[in-house]
Image (cartoon, rainbow, N blue to C red):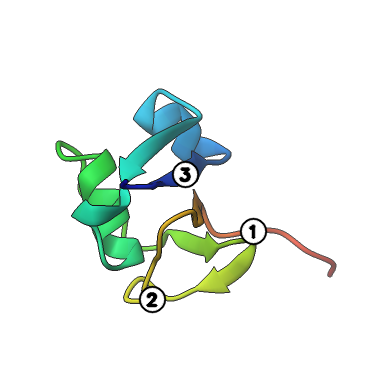
Amino acid sequence: MSMAIKVRYFASLRESVGRTGDSIDAAQVMTVRDVWQAANQDMPLPGNVLAAVNMDYAELDARVEDGDEVAFFPPVTGGCR
């Protein structure tokens, strides 16, 4: 039985892809980058996107496994002056 990887999009990425999330067959992907490509075949991965696996920041080449949740979001901007 194949499990899925849950994909979530936040902030402006949610508007760009036109949905809040996806479910990807875990057998199709090995890395965070693969998850984006499987879910968004017609949209290249933005160069400055941040990613998290199971709520921990992750590099795009980080491995993913059955049952993981992968989140994509734009860089956080702003701060105190």
* Residue 5 or residue 75, whichever sits in front: 5
How far separated are the C-alphas under marks 3 and 2?
15 Å
Q: Nearer the viewer, mark 1 or mark 2?
A: 2
| 53 relative position to 55: left or right | left
Amino acid under disc 1: Thr
Labelled pair 3, 1 in contact (Cβ < 8 Å): no
Mark 3: secondary structure = strand
Please give the residue where the numbered disc 3 appears in the rendered image: 6
Mark 1: secondary structure = loop
Q: Nearer the viewer, mark 3 or mark 1?
A: 3
> Looking at the image, is 49 positioned above or below residue 42?
below
Please give the residue where the numbered disc 2 appears in the rendered image: 62
> Looking at the image, is 70 positioned above or below residue 24?
below
Labelled pair 3, 2 in contact (Cβ < 8 Å): no
Amino acid under disc 3: Lys
Amino acid under disc 2: Ala
Please give the residue where the numbered disc 1 appears in the rendered image: 77
* Res 42 label: none
Q: Position of residue 39 (x, y in %)?
A: 28, 40
Q: Which quarter shows the C terminus? A: bottom right
Image point (36%, 71%), residue name = 60
How far separated are the C-alphas under marks 1 and 2?
24 Å
Q: Nearer the viewer, mark 3 or mark 2?
A: 3
> Looking at the image, is 32 positioned above or below residue 59?
above
| 19 relative position to 80: left or right | left
* Residue 42 or residue 22, whichever sits in front: 22
At label 1, counting other C-alpha atoms closer than 10 Å, the crowd grade (few under 14, some 14-19, many 20 or more) is few
Image point (44%, 25%), residue name = 19
Image point (22%, 46%), residue name = 38
* Residue 66 or residue 43, whichever sits in front: 66
Upstream in the sequence, badge 3 or badge 1?
A: 3
Upstream in the sequence, badge 3 or badge 2?
A: 3
